[in-house]
Image (cartoon, helix red, strand yellow):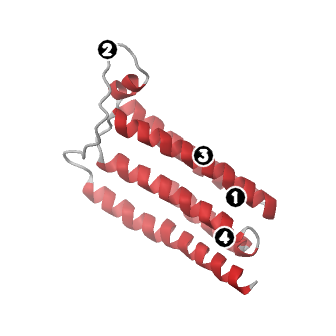
Amino acid sequence: MLVAAGVLDWALHRAQRIEFTAGIAESALHLAMLVLVGSAILAALLLEPTAGLLAGLIAVVLLHDLSYLADLRVALAKRRIPVLEQWVHGFQHLLPWAGLSCLLALAPGQTLALLQQPGYTADWALRFKAQPPWTYTAVMFVVSMLLNVLPFCEEAWRSVRAAQRH
């Protein structure tokens, strides 16, 4: 769902030709959010859900939110954001929180330890899973590269070129 929202967001930006409005500033924020979400998903797939990982993911999701707010501030100052794009942004904002909530629910002991509940000890180590889902991870990596990373790099390239022309 997040990959689909990402490629749809890119297509909407391309149709609006944001390289001529918000340009590099907005595109850089898109890349930052992509790195934040991508690294969080990769960590969640490959690492044990310890308190250390959960705390790190909470920090990443909060940073994503700050980037999202900065993105809105930049975009709204330079261009109109159509209703469909606002709807897509809603998914992009919600999905990292939904994923984090699922992971917190799947690791109740470490979640309760993070909340400093009696009887629960936080494990702050970052450890690889004994059997990470390699096939799923590889497929999602390739799909994400093709449908999110490359399109948003193309958006950044268009923005840089547009800035050089003006």
Kindly identify which residue carries mark 4.
24
For residue 65, which numbered disc appears in the image? Answer: 3
- Tell me which numbered mark, 2 or 4, is placed earlier along the sequence: 4
Q: Earlier in the sequence, mark 2 or mark 1?
A: 1
Residue located beneath label 2 in the image: 119
Residue at 66% in and 70% down: 24
Tell me how far mark 3 sits from mark 1, CA to CA.
Answer: 17 Å
Q: Secondary structure at mark 1?
A: helix
Amino acid at circle 3: Asp
**CB-based contact (under 8 Å), mark 1 and mark 4:** no
Asked if residue 151 lies left or right of residue 41, the reply is: right
Q: Residue at x 52, y 59 (%)?
A: 34
CA gap between label 1 and label 4 equals 19 Å
The residue mark sitting in front, 2 or 1, is 2
Answer with mark 3 or mark 4, whichever residue precedes in sequence: 4
* Residue 79 can be seen, yes or no: no
Q: Earlier in the sequence, mark 3 or mark 2?
A: 3
Instruction: State the image quarter where residue 142 is shown.
Output: bottom left
How far apart are the alpha carbons under marks 3 and 4? 19 Å
User: In the shown orientation, is residue 31 left or right of residue 102?
Assistant: right
* Spatial CA span between label 2 and label 1: 46 Å
Regarding mark 4 in the picture, which secondary structure is present there?
helix
Residue 165 visible in the picture: yes
Q: Position of residue 64 (x, y in %)?
A: 56, 49
Neighbours of disc 2 within 10 Å: few (<14), some (14-19), many (20+): few
**What residue is at 25 percent from the left and 50 percent from the top?**
132
Query: Residue, x 36% and y 49% (percent of image)?
Result: 43
Q: Quadrant of the C terminus?
A: bottom right
Mark toward the viewer: 1 or 4: 4
